[in-house]
């Protein structure tokens, strides 16, 4: 594909969902350029902030199990680290607000570290030790008054899950979310098995770089394949109880896909899912960027349509956005045809 060469993005995997089912998957280019290893449906990509949507499923499962209440102050159930004192009202920081970026918390995002680096703890991350500028997670707005994107909030949610389950976040997600859903090539950690099928990440000029690893797994650290993520999107669209395998109730997913107030021109979210309006076309899902990676998952619920695009290059958004534009045109054309 000309676009991948022009933008120095070696590989791309695209899945399209029609009528709530994967219609087709196309894999283009290389997972690894030097070894001429092609991208396949089993190639592992890091998906950056798309991780947040998947993390939200694990957290919402805790609400179904009665371990966390969506509207209870989160500080009440934290012991390893708590939100520091603030002029703002700490008791208004709830899981509902954290998942919808309305909790008033700081830290937009995280850059991660090169694979092989010893990771700092969650508590150290929350204190700002993984950020070059030392920015810690704290209240910067009155909770419930403003939409402000916060990867820091998701790191706090990761701690909340660990504290309430007494389990490691990645291990919990694998056992209670991924395995029951059949997402067998999805993991918040780079395991040996994942590495053998992983794409190589490439920077903006097309040079290979080491994989990034994250203390902040819930916010940015998920690895998956186009096949697994497309199946996750199918479940988000159809909410089919037999395929959900009791991971979440259909009505819980429906709740997650409703907007949470307040929202603004800067953004609008449900619980984990973001509402997006590229090209004036309203979708739900998420995009994700980490150094060497770019991912996007868009869903149009009323037509049961979706598109998932994973790239192993920092310029990936320049590749997937024109594909997204064509996808929007095809849905608009189909809807126009129906209305005529």
Image (cartoon, rainbow, N blue to C red):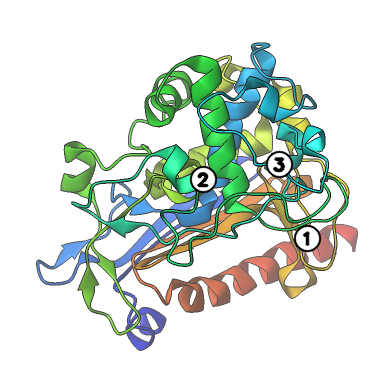
Tell me if residue 313 can be seen: yes
Label whose residue precedes the other's in the sequence (1 or 2): 2
Label 1, label 2: how far apart the Cα atoms are:
33 Å
Viewer-nearest of discs 2 and 3: 3
* Whether label 1 touches label 3, CB < 8 Å: no
Name the spot of residue 133 as percent of width and height, x first. 48, 67
Q: Viewed as shown, does residue 249 lie left or right of 185? A: right
Label whose residue precedes the other's in the sequence (1 or 3): 3
Q: Secondary structure under badge 3?
A: loop
Taking the spot 39% from the left edge, 73% from the top edge, the residue there is: 314
Name the spot of residue 128 as percent of width and height, x first. 49, 53
- Where on the picture, by quarter, is residue 316? bottom left
Viewer-nearest of discs 1 and 2: 2
Q: Secondary structure under badge 1?
A: loop
Label 2, label 3: how far apart the Cα atoms are:
14 Å
Q: Which residue is mark 2?
A: 126
* Labelled disc at residue 282: 1
């Amino acid at each position: 594909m000309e676009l991948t060469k022009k933008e120095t993005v070696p590989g791309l995997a695209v899945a399209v969902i029609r009528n709530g089912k994967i219609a087709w998957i196309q894999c283009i280019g290389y997972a690894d350029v030097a070894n001429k290893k092609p991208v396949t449906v089993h190639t592992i990509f890091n998906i950056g902030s798309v991780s947040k949507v998947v993390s939200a499923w694990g957290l919402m499962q805790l609400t179904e199990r009665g371990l966390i209440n969506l509207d209870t102050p989160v500080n009440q159930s934290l012991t390893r680290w708590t939100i520091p004192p603030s002029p703002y009202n700490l008791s208004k920081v709830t899981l509902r607000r954290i998942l919808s970026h309305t909790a008033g918390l700081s830290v937009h995002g995280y850059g991660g570290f090169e694979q092989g680096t010893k990771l700092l703890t969650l508590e150290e991350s929350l204190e700002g030790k993984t950020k070059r500028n030392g920015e810690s997670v704290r209240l910067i707005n009155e909770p419930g008054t403003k939409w402000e994107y916060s990867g820091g909030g998701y790191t706090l949610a990761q701690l909340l899950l660990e504290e309430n389950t007494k389990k490691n976040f990645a291990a919990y997600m694998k056992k209670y979310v991924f395995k029951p859903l059949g997402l067998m090539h999805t993991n918040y950690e780079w395991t040996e098995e994942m590495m053998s099928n992983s794409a190589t990440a490439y920077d903006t000029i097309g040079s290979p770089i080491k994989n990034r690893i994250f203390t902040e797994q819930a916010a940015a650290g998920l690895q998956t394949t186009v096949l697994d993520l497309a199946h996750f999107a199918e479940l988000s669209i159809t909410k089919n109880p037999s395929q959900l395998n009791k991971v979440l109730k259909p009505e819980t997913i429906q709740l997650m896909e409703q907007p949470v107030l307040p929202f603004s021109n800067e953004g609008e979210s449900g619980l984990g899912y973001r509402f997006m309006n590229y090209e004036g076309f309203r979708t739900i899902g998420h995009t994700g960027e980490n150094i060497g990676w770019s991912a996007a998952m868009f869903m149009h619920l009323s037509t049961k349509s979706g598109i998932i695009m994973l790239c192993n290059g920092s310029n990936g958004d320049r590749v997937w956005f024109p594909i997204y534009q064509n996808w929007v045109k095809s849905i608009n054309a189909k809807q126009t045809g129906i209305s005529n």
